[in-house]
Amino acid sequence: MPISPQEILETIRMIRMEHLDIRTVTMGISLLDVKGDSIEALAENIYKKITERAKNLRDTVEEVSSKYDIPIANTRITVTPIALIARAKEDDDLFPIAQALDRAGKDLRIDYIGGFGALVHKGCTPCDIALMNSIPGALAKLDRVCSSVNVASTKNGINMEAILLMAEKIKETAELSAERDSVACAKLVVYCNAPEDNPFMAGGFHGVGEGESAINVAISGPGTVRSALSKLKDASFNELTEEIKRTAFKITRVGELVGREISAKLGVPFGIVDLSLAPTPEEGDSIADILQAMGLEECGAPGSLAAIALLTDAVKKGGLFASSSVGGMSGTFIPLSEDAGMARAAERGSLTLDKLQAMTAVCSVGLDMVAIPGDTPVETIAGIIADEMAIGMMNNKTVGVRIIPAIGKKAGEWVDFGGLLGKAPILPVSSFRSDAFVRRKGRIQAPITSFTN
Amino acid sequence: MERAVVTVIGKDRVGIVANISSILATHNVNILDISQTIMQDLFAMIMLVDISQADVDLSTLRSEIEAKAKEMGLQAIVQHENIFNYMHRI
C-alpha cells in the first residue's frame, strides 16, 4: 500500500513541530583486549583503539540524519568500565586514562564518552577504589567523559561502603565545579542493576557481556506523545494506552531504521534501540506535560504514579513490537532539570524530592538531574542513594542517582546547566540525619526474591 | 528503484511545482506521483520521486531544492522514503 500524504505529513509534523528526534547514536567499544605497561601507555593504547574503531562514526551519523531529515542530537561512545582493565593500585591516579578518553572524543567530534566507571555491587578491588577516587578530578577538568558506578544489584544486594564513598565523590565533584553550579555531577551516575547496553549518558558503558562493538540508539519523543494525548480529552484509560502504544511504535521504528542503517554502513553489529521517553528542556517536550495532558493539574499531583505507570507500560508495549532488539533503560525518564515541565512543577511546589523518588519506583531511571542544597551532608546524600538503590534492588529494576549538590546555593534557588541539561530549582532535603546508619560496614543482603534458581 | 519524498510546505503560490520539477529534471530525477493537501492551514505539495538514475547524491539534491523553496518563501523537506515505510507499515 503506498504511503498516503497524511502519513507523510504526520511524520514531518512529529519531526519538525513535536521534537521527535534520535537522542543519541552510541557506539559501544570493548577495551578488554587493551593493555599497557604503565597507566600512561594504557591510556595511549585506549586512545588508539577508540579512534580507529570509531573513525567514521560522526560522518555516518550526519549522513543518515540528513537522508531521513531526522535530527540526531548526540553522537556518543561507550567503553568497557575502565576499572576492569586499568590494573591499578589503590592510590594510583587514573586521570591519564580519562584524559585519553576525552581526547579521543574530541578528535572524533563526538559529544560524550561513557565508561570511566566501575562495577562494585559486591565489593571493591584496589583498582575500583583508584577509579572512584579519580572521578572528581576527571569530571571537573574534562568535558566529554562520563562516569557510572554500579553499587547494587538484585542478585548481590547493596554495597553500602561503596555508596558512602560515592557520596563523598559526588560532593568532591560538586566542589570542584562549584563556579558552574556544580555541573560536573551531571556526568556521574550511581546505579543499581546497571544495563550493559545503555546508550544514554551519563550512565552508558559497554558491558563485559557485550561483543567487540555495537551500535545502540536512543529515541526521544515526549512531545509527540503529549501532542497525541492532547487530542483525547475525554478518552478512557484504555484509549489513552492505545494512543501511546501507536505513537511509541512509530517513534521506535525511526530508531530501528537509523540504528540498522548506521550499523550496516559502519560494519558494526546493531545492538539495541532504547525506547525510553527522554524529555528535553524544549517547550512541550516534557513528561510533566504528558501528565497534564492526561488530566493532572500538575506533575506530582495525586495520581502521578498511576499516570507514569500507565505511560511507561504503554511505551514499552508499543515499542517492543516495533524493534527486534530493545534494551538499555527503556522506560520513562523524569530528569528534573532536563524537563522544563518537571522544573516548573518543582517550583510550584507540586513536585517534591519524596514524590519524585516515589515516581522512580514505576518508571526508569531513578533520581535524575536533581539539584539539592550544596551544604547537604555526605551521609544524607548516601542515605538518598541507598533508598533509591533499595527501590531498584527490591523491584528488580534499573535505577540510578544523578544528584547535584549545588555548592553555595540553597533550596529554592535555581541552577542552570545549559543546553540539554536544562535548569531547575534546588529541592529541599530532609534535615533528619542518617549518619549512624550509612556509616555501618558491609553490604545489605540481596532480597529473598532474588533466589530464583 | 530508490525513491525519495519531496515535501514543500508554505503559502500556495504560482510556480511551486514548476520550480521544483525543473531542479528534478536537471538531475534526471523522475516524478512518480504528486499530490497536494492542506496541513494546519498551510499548503503542502508532496512528490514521490525516483532517485536511482540521479546524477547527484541525495544531499546535493536536497540543498538545491531547499534553496529554491527558500527563495519562494517556502520550506522544503527531502527524505528517503524508507522512513515512511518504517513508521507507517508493518
Image (tube, coloured by chain):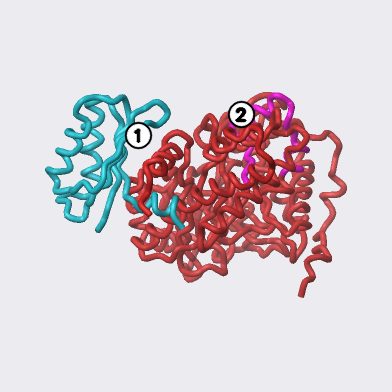
Chain colours: A red, B cyan
Q: Position of residue A288 (x, y in %)?
A: 64, 34
Residue B37 has which mark?
A: 1
Q: Is residue A61 left or right of residue A250?
A: left
- Look at 49% across and 69% down and name the residue there: A211
- Look at 83% across and 66% down and name the residue there: A448
Q: Which residues are magenta?
A: A332-359
Residue A341 shown in magenta: yes
Name the outermost residue toward the left.
Answer: B26
- Look at 73% across and 38% down and name the residue there: A304
Asked if A276 appears above or below A371 in the picture, the reply is: below
Q: Position of residue A55 (x, y in %)?
A: 34, 57
How dense is the environment of label 1, judged by Cα within 10 Å: few (below 14), some, or many (20 and up)? some
Disc 1 marks which amino acid? Answer: Thr
Q: Is residue A257 left or right of residue A321?
A: left
- Look at 44% across and 61% down and name the residue there: A46
Q: Position of residue A166 (x, y in %)?
A: 69, 50
Tell me the quarter of the picture where residue A384 sits: top right
Q: Position of residue A392 (x, y in %)?
A: 73, 54
Residue to which mark 2 is pinned:
A415
Q: Is residue A82 left or right of residue A56?
A: right
Q: Secondary structure at mark 1?
A: strand
Quadrant assignment for the C terminus of chain A = bottom right
For the residue pair B5 and A441, the one nearer the viewer reads as B5
